[in-house]
Amino acid sequence: MFLEALTALLEHDKRIAVVAATDSGAKAVELARERKPDVALVDLAMPGLDGFELTRELVAADPAPRVVAVSGLSSAHDAERALDAGASSFLLKGGLYEEIAETIVAVSDNPVETGP
């Protein structure tokens, strides 16, 4: 439900172009290789390939997207592990949509042009 709601909100933000969404770490790696996103929003608590390992795989890719790690738990340990894995930023899922969108834009090397 979080994935669907956030994807819908981000698709309406003119600064962000959503190129893919999935709840599978393995599929995320595949999609990142195909679509080469500038930023990947990664949930740390994914089944199978967890968000920490996914982050490591994504930042090792060429070209590597910036990773914004998100978690439903407020844990300094998880934040530290995500940043150690290569994430550019760490956010809580309960954060405001604006905070998530601003962070995505801030870490992106190529924000979408919004025009005059």
Image (cartoon, rainbow, N blue to C red):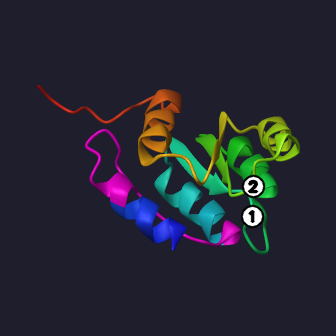
Image x and y of residue 93, in percent: 60, 54
- For residue 1, side relative to residue 27 (left or right): left
Which element carries disc 1, helix, strand or loop?
loop
Residue type at numbered disc 2:
Leu
The residue where tag 1 is placed is 45
Name which quarter of the figure residue 9 lies in.
bottom left
Question: Main structural element of the magenta stretch: helix, strand or loop?
Answer: loop
Give the residues in magenta. Answer: 9-26
Residue type at numbered disc 1:
Ala
**Mark closer to the chain start, 1 or 2:** 1
Q: Is residue 23 magenta?
A: yes
The residue where tag 2 is placed is 73
Front residue of 39 and 34 = 39
Q: Is residue 106 magenta?
A: no
Tag count in the figure?
A: 2
Distance between the Cα atoms at labels 1 and 2? 9 Å
Name which quarter of the figure residue 83 lies in.
top right
Image x and y of residue 50, in percent: 78, 63
Circles 1, 2 touching at the beta carbon (< 8 Å): yes
Which residue is found at the position 41% from the left and 41% from the top?
Answer: 98
Image x and y of residue 68, in percent: 61, 43
Which element carries disc 2, helix, strand or loop?
loop
